[in-house]
């Protein structure tokens, strides 16, 4: 029987992608837990008059609510792509929760700078 060996570069790429996916799955999965209380309290961001029309407040709430969904779907699809040997696409999809985090941080910074820390801007 002849053994088929993969080139070392493919093996290294596969191992590095697997390591990244494991770390991303654990870190982003753990970050879902502190986001749940924030999601439950996010309705209170709309208590002040005028905040229901505030774009940064709506953006912050959407990024908070979307984070668990983006994380679960992104990580699941990333592992599927990894098994199909599409490593770059797997890394990109596993990194999608970063976008939700950055959008939320951006909305908070925008409200702090331009709205004087108020949800009604």
Image (cartoon, rainbow, N blue to C red):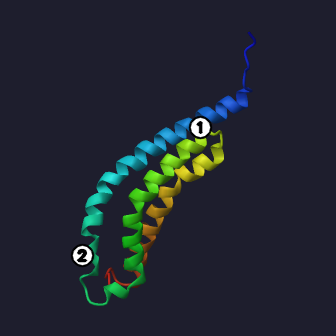
Q: Return the residue nearer the eye: 79 or 105.
A: 79
Q: Quadrant of residue 61?
A: bottom left
Residue at x 29%, y 58% (from the top left corner): 36
Seen as rendered, the residue at the extreme bottom is: 50
Seen as rendered, the residue at the extreme front is: 1
> What residue is pinned by disc 2?
44
Q: Which mark is residue 83?
A: 1
Q: Return the residue nearer the eye: 91 or 74.
A: 74
40 left or right of 32 in image: left
Q: Secondary structure at mark 1?
A: helix
36 w.r.t. 3: above or below: below
Considering the image in quadrants, where does the N terminus appear?
Answer: top right
Considering the image in quadrants, where does the C terminus appear?
Answer: bottom left
Residue at x 43%, y 51% (from the top left corner): 72
Residue 70: percent from the left, percent from the top? 46, 58
Neighbours of disc 1 within 10 Å: few (<14), some (14-19), many (20+): few
Residue 62: percent from the left, percent from the top? 40, 71
92 left or right of 60 in image: right
Q: Nearer the viewer, mark 1 or mark 2?
A: 1
Q: Name which of mark 1 and mark 2 comes first in the sequence.
A: 2
Residue at x 46%, y 63% (from the top left corner): 100
19 w.r.t. 65: above or below: above
Residue 26: percent from the left, percent from the top? 41, 42
Residue at x 48%, y 45% (from the top left corner): 24
Res 121 visible? no
């Amino acid at each position: 029987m002849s053994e088929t060996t993969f080139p070392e570069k493919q093996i290294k790429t596969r191992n590095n992608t697997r390591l990244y996916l494991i770390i991303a799955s654990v870190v982003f999965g753990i970050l879902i837990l502190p986001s749940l209380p924030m999601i439950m309290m996010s309705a209170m961001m709309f208590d002040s008059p005028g905040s229901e029309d505030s774009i940064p407040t709506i953006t912050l709430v959407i990024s908070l609510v979307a984070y668990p969904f983006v994380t679960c779907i992104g990580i699941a699809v990333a592992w599927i792509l990894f098994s199909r040997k599409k490593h770059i696409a797997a890394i990109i999809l596993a990194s999608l929760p970063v976008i939700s985090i950055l959008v939320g941080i951006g909305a908070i910074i925008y409200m702090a700078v331009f709205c004087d820390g108020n949800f009604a801007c």
